[in-house]
Image (cartoon, rainbow, N blue to C red):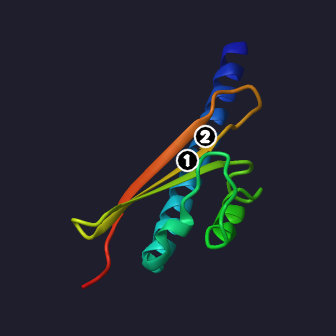
């Protein structure tokens, strides 16, 4: 009986982690879509771990960290232009801790953004 309860508790934890990971995927892809439509200002979306979001990033950042999505998430957005190739690499990392004292989880999505021709 105790073994079954332990298994159920672990499975609920795994389900919660999967839900947060799905939220992180959706949020990262949403930001990439926003950035793809605002390529002239890609650098304005960059944020280091623990940094404060700029004006363009703030609405997405606040929505992502809200209770409805990933409460207290840590966000990093790296923007690396490649002028020779005419594109910019963007990496969005979202990290979260499901319970206090547990190891942090993170998910990174990277994409190349290039102006349409």
Quadrant of the rendering where the C terminus is positioned: bottom left
Image spot of residue 58 (x, y percent): 68, 67
Residue at x 32% of width, y 79% of height: 115
Examine the rendering and report whether any part of residue 1 can be seen.
no
Quadrant of the rendering where the N terminus is positioned: top right
Q: CB atoms at circles 2 and 1 under 8 Å apart?
A: yes
The picture quadrant where one finds residue 39 is bottom left
Examine the rendering and report whether any part of residue 67 can be seen.
yes
Numbered marks: total: 2
Q: Nearer the viewer, residue 98 or 113?
A: 113
Image spot of residue 57 (x, y percent): 62, 67
The picture quadrant where one finds residue 56 is bottom right
Mark 1 surroundings within 10 Å by alpha-carbon count, few (fewer than 14), some (14 through 19), many (20 or more): some
Residue at x 43% of width, y 75% of height: 36
Residue at x 49% of width, y 75% of height: 41
The tag on residue 17 is 2
- Which residue is outermost to the front? 83
Disc 2 versus disc 1: distance between alpha carbons?
6 Å
Q: Mark 1 points at which residue?
A: 21
Element under label 1? Answer: helix
- Which residue is outermost to the top? 2
Element under label 2? Answer: helix
Image spot of residue 11 (x, y percent): 61, 31
Mark 2 surroundings within 10 Å by alpha-carbon count, few (fewer than 14), some (14 through 19), many (20 or more): some
Q: Nearer the viewer, residue 17 or 49?
A: 49
Q: In this view, does 101 lie to the left or right of 60?
A: right
The tag on residue 49 is none
In the rendered view, tell whether residue 69 sits above or below residue 85: above
């Amino acid at each position: 009986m105790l073994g079954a309860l332990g298994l159920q508790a672990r499975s609920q934890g795994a389900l919660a982690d999967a839900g947060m990971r799905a939220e992180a995927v959706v949020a990262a892809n949403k930001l990439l879509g926003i950035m793809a439509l605002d390529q002239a200002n890609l650098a304005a979306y960059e944020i280091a771990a623990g940094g404060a979001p700029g004006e363009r990033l703030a609405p997405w950042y606040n929505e992502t960290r809200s209770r409805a999505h990933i409460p207290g998430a840590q966000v990093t957005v790296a923007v690396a232009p490649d002028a020779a190739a005419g594109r910019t690499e963007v990496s969005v990392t979202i990290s979260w801790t499901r319970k206090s004292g547990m190891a942090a989880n993170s998910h990174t999505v990277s994409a190349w953004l290039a102006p349409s021709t």
